[in-house]
Amino acid sequence: MKSTDVFPSKYMKAEDLDGDLEVTIEHVALEGLKDQAGHEVDKPVAFFEEFQKGLILNKTNWAMIAKQHGDESDDWNGKKITLTVIDVDAFGEVVSAIRVKLPKGKGPKKLPDGPAMEDSW
């Protein structure tokens, strides 16, 4: 028996992904969730056509979707994004987290070949 069988969640966790996953945004909704102090706060949650669970959007993931599809979440319905899992430092621990990945060719531009940054100082 797995912990996800005993403690099911309606929200995605890193353990739910096995590699990169391209998904289509069905809609984004605000849902009441508890913060670390136990207070109820509204958080945006993205729901996908290919997955039953929603993804709670943090600022990082919101910004990555906005970079691809604009900042108005009502315009994201039907848009595709790629989810991936990376290790992040959260609250003093290294944990696996779901992140939205930019499509190839949409990342930061590479510097032209030349001296290393530290050589030019």
Image (cartoon, rainbow, N blue to C red):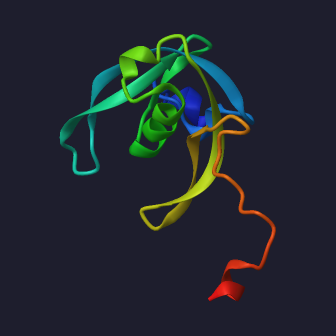
Percent of width and height locating residue 23? 62, 20
Tell me what residue is drawn at x 67 percent, y 85 percent.
120
Residue closest to the far left: 39
99 left or right, relative to 46 = right
- Horizontally, residue 101 falls left or right of residue 64, namely right
Q: Residue at x 55, y 16 (%)?
A: 79
Q: Residue at point 69% right, 28% down? A: 21
Where residue 22 appears, as percent x and y from the top left, is 68, 24
Residue 32 position, x and y percent, is 25, 28
Q: Is residue 113 left or right of residue 81?
A: right
Quadrant in the rendering for residue 41:
top left
How many numbered marks, from 0 up? 0
Residue displayed at 55% across by 36% down: 13
Q: Residue furthest right?
A: 113
User: Is residue 28 depicted above or below 107 in this figure?
Assistant: above
Give the position of the C terminus as an image quadrant: bottom right
User: Which quarter of the figure has residue 68?
Assistant: top right
Taking depth in this image into account, of 102 and 92 the one nearest to the observer is 102
- Quick one: quadrant of the N terminus? top right
Q: Looking at the picture, does residue 55 appear above or below residue 119?
A: above
Residue 75, given in percent of the width and then of the height, sits at 42, 16
